[in-house]
Image: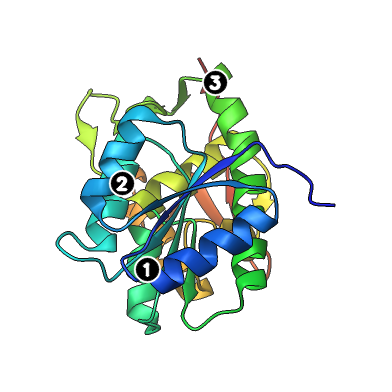
Amino acid sequence: MTTIDPRHLLVVEDDEDIRTLIAKYLVDHGFTVTLAGSGGEMDKILATEKVDLVVLDVNLPGEDGFSICLRLRNVNRLPVVMVTSRGEDMDRILGIELGADDYLVKPFIPRELLARIGAVLRRSAPEQEAEKATEKYCFEGFVLELLTRRLSRPSGARVILTSAEFETLLTLCQRPGRVFSRDQLKSAATTDRSVDITVSRLRQKIEKDPRDPVLIQTVRSAGYVFSAKVTSQ
């Protein structure tokens, strides 16, 4: 007997056969599923319905999935799993940096997609609950605002962050003093190298001396730790 999952998935895929196959599999596993063939159709659905996660194809007619993913992240924190036939490392890194929570390359087994969706939903649930209670994190005069995804300097000037940088900084702010391995920071990046690049860019933006960081410190053979005192409001 299929367990009914109350969460609503939106599949944005222009290939009707693939779209139908994905939808049937997810419905068979208890999800409510809505289908869209383009970014425009997706926008109409999001304007009227509550969606918990978007399965987003990269190669769409008109606006591509990368651009759509960036738009979604600029508006809200809706979890996104990107699906594409483009498996190059740079494409995967770009997708994650633009805000995707996971990236799956075609052809794939539907069971793998189901597992990725489940993992993303589990990761996003505590973050979403925390965001309901917390509007901003403050450290060393910086203010990280969750609703607007904005980081401000002590002077009030805005620090422009990529989605990967925002996600990584948010994770660190939520658990200051905790050592995070690179694997634990991969919700914002797909490889150890991309995690290191994201941390390096953050240091350039928030450290007084990025060559001698005191806020985001490296723990040898373990990962990174956020050493700043953080308060939430």
Mark closer to the observer (3, 1): 1
Q: Residues within 10 Å of mark 3 (few under 14, many from 20)?
A: few
Q: Which residue has dot 3 on it?
A: 132
Which is nearer the N-term, disc 2 or disc 1? 1
The secondary element bearing badge 2 is classed as: helix
Which is nearer the N-term, disc 2 or disc 3? 2
Q: Residue at x 38, y 24 (%)?
A: 141
Q: Which residue has dot 2 on it?
A: 42
Q: Which residue has dot 1 on it?
A: 16
Q: Amino acid at mark 2?
A: Met
Q: Residues within 10 Å of mark 1 (few under 14, many from 20)?
A: few
Mark closer to the observer (2, 1): 1
Q: Is residue 195 visible?
A: no
The secondary element bearing badge 1 is classed as: helix
Q: Residue at x 47, y 65 (%)?
A: 20
Given the current orientation, which residue lies at the most extreme right position? 1
Q: Position of residue 88 (x, y in %)?
A: 37, 85
Above or below, 46 against 54 in this view is: above
Kindly indicate whether the residue at mark 3 contacts the one at mark 2 (C-beta within 8 angstroms).
no
Above or below, 158 against 63 in this view is: above
Which is nearer the N-term, disc 3 or disc 1? 1
Q: Position of residue 228 (x, y in %)?
A: 53, 35
Kindly indicate whether the residue at mark 1 contacts the one at mark 3 (C-beta within 8 angstroms).
no
Given the current orientation, which residue lies at the most extreme top position? 233
